[in-house]
């Protein structure tokens, strides 16, 4: 074989055989499944995930495909959507809530699952440990026990005369009982009485609002949950109309008109989830990728709502907060 023929043959081999991640077929665009209960594809939270993918060289529609399934706040839709993603199949499934992660886990033990904003994957039984998950689930946790006390402390600062706080929480959320226990303990240390108001689905919210109205608590708090986040507008409207100071776990509540929120950034978690996806597409096993816990927390205050409620926000809080005028 002469030199020119050899070079031609080698060049043809390079063109025909691009480097791909282990386990992927050459030339096949990987598909990422996304299963959400409360986050729509058009939101800034999910756009942060797309940005994270772009940072790792993935461009939707060019070298990666995203199969998005949004349950619109209805947990009963999740099982069928999870099963649909598994049948496709997809290379990895990204979830944004405890319930979505649980349904994805029940649908498959083989496809890797990345939890973007899970409350407590260890407590929910999805992983063996945070350092070595051991199965097909990894990702990011929102678990930070001190947050319950911090949120109630913020309520006391803006409403010093508050004595009773109603806590709306989703009993269908496996992590919620732990959140409630932490919140109850924090309330006791602050001299507050905590009233538990239980819901299981969006259909229960109106009844929950009636319970709160009859009990006439001084303030309101919601515990972290995807279904409650999906129904943030209804909850915020109730809190505002009933003229009760309220604190929420996610900034999206404050952006929707809620008085204030304190917690990890959901958008940042989703952006970070893209790093896990990248590692998995390149051959890493979820069993070996440690669960990350939050390290940065944001206080967001809606000044328009504070004014409507006749509340004066202490300067010490304003200096620490991101404000919505």
Image (cartoon, rainbow, N blue to C red):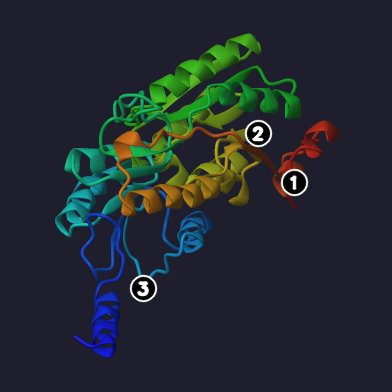
Q: Secondary structure at mark 1?
A: helix
Q: Is residue 218 visible?
A: no
The structure residue drawn at horizontal position 45% and vertical position 50%, both measured from the top left corner, is 275
What whole-number distance in Å separates the C-alpha atoms at marks 2 and 1? 12 Å
Q: Is residue 92 above or below residue 50?
A: above
The residue identified by callout 1 is 303
User: On the rendered structure, is 313 left or right of 202?
Assistant: right
The residue identified by callout 3 is 61
Q: Quadrant of residue 281?
A: bottom left
Say which quadrant the N terminus sits in: bottom left
Q: Secondary structure at mark 3?
A: loop
What whole-number distance in Å separates the C-alpha atoms at marks 3 and 2? 45 Å
The residue identified by callout 2 is 245
Please state which of the two labelled residues, at mark 1 or mark 3, is closer to the viewer. 3
The structure residue drawn at horizontal position 41% and vertical position 49%, both measured from the top left corner, is 38
Q: Secondary structure at mark 2?
A: loop
Label 2 or label 1, whichever comes before in sequence order: 2
Q: Is residue 101 above or below residue 53?
A: above
Q: Residue 30: x and y, percent?
A: 28, 63
Q: Residues within 10 Å of mark 1 (few under 14, many from 20)?
A: many
Residue that extends furthest to the front in the rendered view of this protein: 2
Label 1 or label 3, whichever comes before in sequence order: 3
């Amino acid at each position: 074989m002469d030199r020119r023929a050899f070079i031609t043959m080698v060049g043809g081999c390079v063109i025909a055989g691009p480097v791909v991640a282990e386990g992927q077929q050459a030339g096949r665009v990987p598909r990422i499944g996304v299963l959400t209960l409360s986050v729509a594809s058009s939101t800034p939270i999910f756009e942060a995930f797309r940005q994270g993918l772009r940072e790792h060289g993935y461009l939707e529609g060019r070298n990666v495909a995203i199969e998005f399934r949004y349950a619109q706040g209805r947990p009963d839709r999740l099982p069928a959507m999870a099963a649909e993603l598994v049948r496709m199949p997809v290379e990895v499934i990204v979830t944004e809530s405890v319930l979505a992660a649980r349904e994805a886990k029940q649908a498959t033990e083989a496809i890797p699952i990345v939890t973007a904003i899970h409350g407590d994957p260890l407590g929910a039984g999805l992983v063996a440990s945070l350092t070595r998950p051991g199965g097909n689930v990894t990702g990011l946790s929102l678990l930070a026990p001190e947050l319950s006390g911090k949120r109630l402390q913020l309520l006391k600062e803006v409403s010093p005369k508050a004595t009773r706080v109603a806590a709306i929480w989703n009993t269908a959320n496996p992590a919620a009982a732990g959140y409630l226990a932490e919140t109850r303990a924090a309330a006791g240390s602050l001299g507050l009485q905590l009233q538990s108001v239980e819901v299981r689905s969006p259909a229960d919210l109106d009844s929950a609002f009636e319970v709160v109205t009859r009990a006439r608590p001084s303030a309101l708090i919601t515990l972290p949950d995807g279904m409650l986040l999906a129904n943030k507008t209804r909850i915020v409207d109730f809190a505002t109309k009933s003229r009760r100071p309220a604190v929420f776990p996610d900034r999206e509540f404050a952006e929707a008109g809620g008085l204030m929120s304190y917690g990890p950034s959901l958008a940042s978690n989703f952006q970070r989830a893209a790093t896990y996806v990248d590692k998995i597409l390149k051959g890493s096993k979820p069993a070996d990728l440690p669960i990350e816990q939050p390290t940065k927390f944001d206080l967001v205050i809606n000044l328009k709502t504070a004014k409507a409620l006749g509340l004066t926000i202490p300067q010490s809080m304003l200096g620490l907060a991101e404000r919505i005028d």
